[in-house]
Image (cartoon, helix red, strand yellow):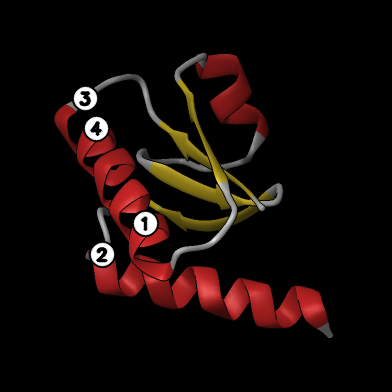
Amino acid sequence: MTIKVLGTGCLNCKTLEQRTREAIASLNIDASVEKVEDIQKIVAYGILRTPGLVIDEKVISSGSVPSVDAIKEMILKHALQAAT
């Protein structure tokens, strides 16, 4: 699983990256986290507000900083959908 945090480096973007890493560690899953700060790459995902969270090239969240538990739910939901 590849997870990308989209954001230009603001506090919310850094917080989302930290919470995403915590969620992955808590779930004990094999996933990589990539921080995307290039504005052109961020715009290519079609989000209007950062930070954004992308799992396997699908935008899962944008414009907010979900809790660690909410991120865990998003990851698990995506994994279930990918398995079917």
The residue shown at (57%, 80%) is: 77
Q: Earlier in the sequence, mark 2 or mark 3?
A: 3
> Which residue is most to the front?
28
Inspect this view and state whether residue 63 appears.
no
From the image, state whether disc 2 or disc 3 is nearer to you: 2
Distance Cα–Cα, label 3 vs label 4: 6 Å
Q: Earlier in the sequence, mark 1 or mark 4?
A: 4
The image quarter in which residue 83 lies: bottom right
User: Where residue 35 sits in the image (x, y, percent)?
Assistant: 46, 27
When the figure is inspected, residue 83 is found, relative to residue 3, above or below; the finding is: below
From the image, state whether disc 1 or disc 2 is nearer to you: 1
The residue shown at (42%, 78%) is: 73
Q: Earlier in the sequence, mark 1 or mark 3?
A: 3
Q: Relative to residue 66, is residue 49 drawn left or right? A: right
The residue shown at (71%, 47%) is: 57
User: Mark 2 and mark 1 in contact (Cβ < 8 Å)?
Assistant: no
Mark 2, residue position:
68
User: Mark 4 and mark 3 in contact (Cβ < 8 Å)?
Assistant: yes
Label 1 CA crowd tier, 10 Å (few <14, some 14–19, many 20+): few
User: Where residue 18 sits in the image (x, y, percent)?
Assistant: 26, 42
Label 2 CA crowd tier, 10 Å (few <14, some 14–19, many 20+): some
Name the mark on residue 25: 1
When the figure is inspected, residue 30 is found, relative to residue 46, above or below; the finding is: below
User: Where residue 24 sits in the image (x, y, percent)?
Assistant: 42, 57
